Every structure is written in structure tokens, then in C-alpha cells.
Image: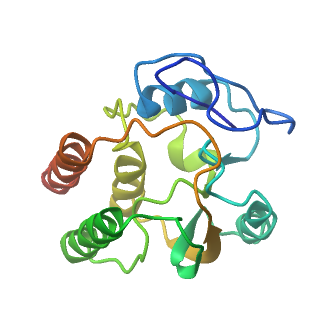
Amino acid sequence: MWTTAQRTGRPSGPKPRARGSFVCPIITGKGVALQRGLEGATEVFVAFIDGDGQDDPRDLAAMVEKARAGHEFVNGSKFIGRIEEGGISRLNFFGNRFMTVLINALFGTRVTDSQSGLRVIARRVIDGRQYLSREYEIETEMLCRAIKDGVTVIEMPVTRRAREGGRTGFRRVRNGLRILMTILRERVTR
């Protein structure tokens, strides 16, 4: 699945060609765009990749193979993979690391990249879910809910490149707080 929620309503990277890919030309947030995409998902697994060109789509093949081998939540991790020059700002690096450490501490797990936009998840894990996230906290909510449901999350090394297109709508303070609140909310609810 490929979605975009750029403020311009245009895709932020090259248009996808894979079966099941589509552009969600809305401007209400990444979380809403991903949820719209999930509504139309029909395959056994759903692949997520950001539309800004920072993730290498070639990494998905190995991730799909892991999923087919029985792993229901395959998370791409740039921190065990490779981050190319310009792939992540220093502030975003530390913000991601903080959120990841917090998730590991609160949920008793051991992930290295809680904010990864490159994932392959069994549709069974996310089918029928009502996610509350409207923006960038969607990855956090999906991860926390899967962990709470007892789904084993495995990680695979991926490559993170410099942004190829568009400009980010991520606002560090606003979206960082939304991610933090999502972690805390998910910890105290069922």
C-alpha cells in the first residue's frame, strides 16, 4: 500500500506501480491516510512505506519473505541497518531513540526503531482495528497495540536515505507530543 497525505494533496515521491498501491489525496494527516488504505487492503500482508523516498523499496522483498515465514509484524529498522548522509536529522534521531526506549520500558519489548514507516504486517493483526491516530503517531499506535496483543515484532535492517521529494509536515514539538501521548495512552488502556 502506498499513500500520501502531503499538505499539497500531491504525492511526495514517485507514484507507485505495485498492485494495491494508491494515492490518498487528503490533507488531514498521515494517520488518516494509512487508515483509509487499510480499509481497502485485501492481501494477507500489508506493506507500509513512506512516500518521501527515504526508504528503499528493495528492502520490502526480504521483509515480505519474513512475513511469509510466519512473522506477523516485520519492522524495518534504520538503526540496525544503514542511515545514509541526510537520512535523519540529529534532533529526529534523538527523538526517535527516546520514544523507542520509552516504548521498550513501558511495554517490555526490545525494538530499535519505533518510528519506522517501513513495515510489513499481517492483515489479521490490524484488521478491524479502530485507530485513534490522525497524524504521525500512527506507527506508534500500531506498534503498541500489536505488542499489547502479544504479537511478536521482529526487526530487519533497512536503508534510510535523504528525502527525495516534497517537504515534511512533521512538526517536532506538536507531533513529538502526539507520539508521546499515544505511548502513554496505549500503556494505560486495555
Residue 166 visible, this orientation: yes
Total count of labels:
0
Q: Position of residue 77 (x, y in %)?
A: 54, 72
Residue at the spot 49% in from the left edge and 38% down from the top edge: 167
In the rendered image, the vertical position of residue 128 relative to residue 118, given as above or below:
above
Residue at the farthest front position: 85
How did the renderer colour the structure?
Answer: rainbow
- Please name whichever residue, 101 or 110, is drawn nearer the observer in this view of the structure: 101
Q: Where the N terminus falls, by quadrant?
A: top right
Residue at the spot 45% in from the left edge and 18% down from the top edge: 27
In the rendered image, the vertical position of residue 83 relative to residue 25, given as above or below:
below
- Please name whichever residue, 31 or 168, is drawn nearer the observer in this view of the structure: 168
Residue at the spot 55% in from the left edge and 23% down from the top edge: 36
In the rendered image, the vertical position of residue 19 relative to residue 70, given as above or below:
above
Q: Is residue 86 left or right of residue 181?
A: right
Q: Position of residue 76 (x, y in %)?
A: 58, 67
Q: Which quadrant holds residue 178?
A: top left
- Please name whichever residue, 48 or 78, is drawn nearer the observer in this view of the structure: 78
Residue at the spot 23% in from the left edge and 71% down from the top edge: 98
Residue 189 visible, this orientation: no
Q: Which quadrant holds residue 42?
A: top right
Q: Is residue 20 left or right of residue 116?
A: right
Q: Is residue 178 left or right of residue 20?
A: left
Q: Position of residue 120 (x, y in %)?
A: 64, 56
Q: Which quadrant holds residue 169?
A: top left
Q: Is residue 145 left or right of residue 66?
A: left
